[in-house]
Image (tube, rainbow, N blue to C red):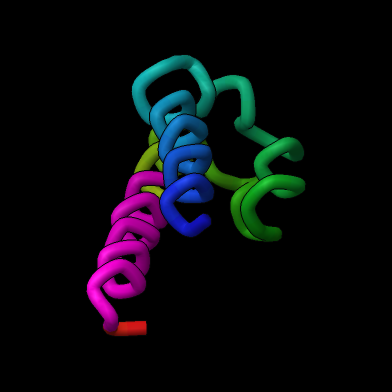
Amino acid sequence: MAFISFAAYSAFCYWVIFLDGATVLEGWKSFLLFDWFAASLTAQELKFYVGISWIGSLVLLLLAMFGGA
């Protein structure tokens, strides 16, 4: 189940980082999806934030798959 959740989150992160997702989500929409401070982020900062969370979720997935968590 964790792999399916990560795959769905990866598709979302790919859309935000590499496609036009960050410009679509810029502003109040990012507040609804991410966090309260994300509403003030620019598109570039939002891409960075999503990229860091993507890497963090990959680490958690690897820990769960190989018996760490």
Indicate left or right for 24 with 55 as reference: right
Residue 40 spot, x, y in % from top left = 62, 47
Extent of the magenta region: 50-67
- Most distant residue in the top direction: 20
**Residue at the image point whose x is 51% and y is 28% from the top:** 22
**Residue at the image point whose x is 28% and y is 83% from the top:** 68
Indicate left or right for 27 with 56 as reference: right
43 over 37 or under it: above or below = above
Decide whether residue 57 is among the magenta residues: yes
Decide whether residue 25 is among the magenta residues: no
User: What main secondary structure does the magenta stretch of the protein show?
Assistant: helix
Indicate left or right for 5 with 44 as reference: right
20 over 9 or under it: above or below = above
40 over 8 or under it: above or below = below
**Residue at the image point whose x is 61% and y is 31% from the top:** 26
Foreground pick, 8 / 48: 8
Residue 36 spot, x, y in % from top left = 70, 59
Residue 46 spot, x, y in % from top left = 47, 41
8 over 22 or under it: above or below = below
Residue 52 spot, x, y in % from top left = 34, 54
